[in-house]
Amino acid sequence: MAKDLIKINKWLYPASWIYGAGVWLRNKLFDWGYYKERSFDLPVICIGNLTVGGTGKTPHTEYLIKLLQKNFQVAVLSRGYKRKSKGFVLAQANTPVHQIGDEPFQMKQKFPNIHMAVDADRCHGIEQLCQESIATGTDVILLDDAFQHRYVKAGVNILLVDYNRMITEDTLLPAGRMREPISGKDRAHIVIITKCPKEMKPMEYRVLQKQMNLYAFQQLYYTTLDYGKLFPLFNGGREYSMQQIHPAVHILLVTGIAAPQVLEEDLLAINKNIHTLAYGDHHDFTEQDILDIERQFLELPEGKRMIITTEKDSVRIASHPQLPESIKPYIYVLPIEIVFLQDQQEMFNKYILDYVRKNSRNSRLFEG
């Protein structure tokens, strides 16, 4: 499976060398102090990767929200990829998806009490979230997909690496999918290998640890994907697990994510009647796409059919004005969650909570 996802376009190596030289120079200008990194008075946690898409940033960010929101006012700052707005936008309960992007919209819907903001200029976005008049009581800021945004000096950098496309076997854009050389991993405080098989042998962990070749100060974790209960996109109704889907039911899987192969294989393991419509990451569904979804769905056996999509895709599908009423009752959403392997969850949680407590406003006031 892993090798199937790693496709190197060797004929593009010359372009990758030119791109790599530019990235190397930019990073060196930060290292030498010509470009300034900026620290902030609040705890800032960055979640990102070295590759283009598909490492599981959203479920890992949501894990951090769940961990922190019990005791802290959490703010999440994202670029808001493919949004139709400009500058800084702080999401409200009624903010439409096109104003902030699909992933921020999803997080705001799931966690209404967080401050969810988008801004391409992360320094400016953090400045806004630190103002009481804009985002009251912010205790900690999560930066979504900002590992390359070095103008912000985060207190904790979390680097996500896809098990199915290890950075040790990939190469730079455009020949591969890496945004910067593998040496970029040295900036991470925590490295998480994501989408691991649920059952890995001790030898596999040792091989991955050796591959990553981390410094002593860096912590290495392993997570796998798990799935919540399927729920209807419209009108409420029954929720049930994937295992409860009748084997005779035909499933039309509609995705617009970077790496749908893992999800498709997991569904195939419990149901062989999978029909896939896979679009590009953050796909903006057109009227023709909606017609194609309706047509393919109606071609499935009547009375034994359903549509499954991801949470990220569901927010764009649900708001589409051309979505037919006839197929709405058959659209189900499959939530994706992450689970730590090797009983590492408690250690990870403690690291994050200790960092936020130590660097919170209350802590500094107490020390003062």
Image (spheres, helix red, strand yellow):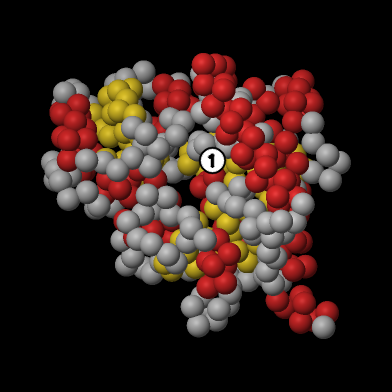
Using the rendered view, name the quadrant where residue 223 is placed: top right
Using the rendered view, name the quadrant where residue 21 is placed: top right
Residue type for callout 1: Gly
Residue that lies at the very extreme toward the right in this rendered image: 216
Which residue position is annotated with label 1? 56
Nearest to the observer: residue 108 or residue 187: 187
Nearest to the observer: residue 286 or residue 333: 286
Nearest to the observer: residue 231 or residue 203: 203
Indicate left or right for 88 with 124 as reference: left
The spot of residue 28 in percent (x, y) is 72, 46
The spot of residue 272 in percent (x, y) is 36, 18
Helix, strand or loop status at disc 1: loop
- Please indicate, yes or no, whether residue 366 appears anywhere in the rendered image: yes
Residue at the (71%, 56%) spot, across then down: 34
Residue at the (76%, 22%) spot, across then down: 207
Quadrant of the frame with the N terminus = top right
Tell me if residue 87 comes above or below residue 250 in the rendering.
Answer: below
Residue at the (42%, 26%) spot, across then down: 264
Indicate left or right for 89 with 21 as reference: left
Tell me if residue 189 comes above or below residue 120 in the rendering.
Answer: above
Residue at the (50%, 38%) spot, across then down: 53
* Mark 1 nearby-residue class (10 Å; few <14, some 14–19, many ≥20): many
The spot of residue 180 in percent (x, y) is 62, 37
Quadrant of the frame with the C terminus = bottom right
The spot of residue 266 in percent (x, y) is 46, 26
- Please indicate, yes or no, whether residue 346 appears anywhere in the rendered image: no
Using the rendered view, name the quadrant where residue 159 is placed: top right
Number of numbered discs:
1
Tell me if residue 166 comes above or below residue 47 in the rendering.
Answer: above
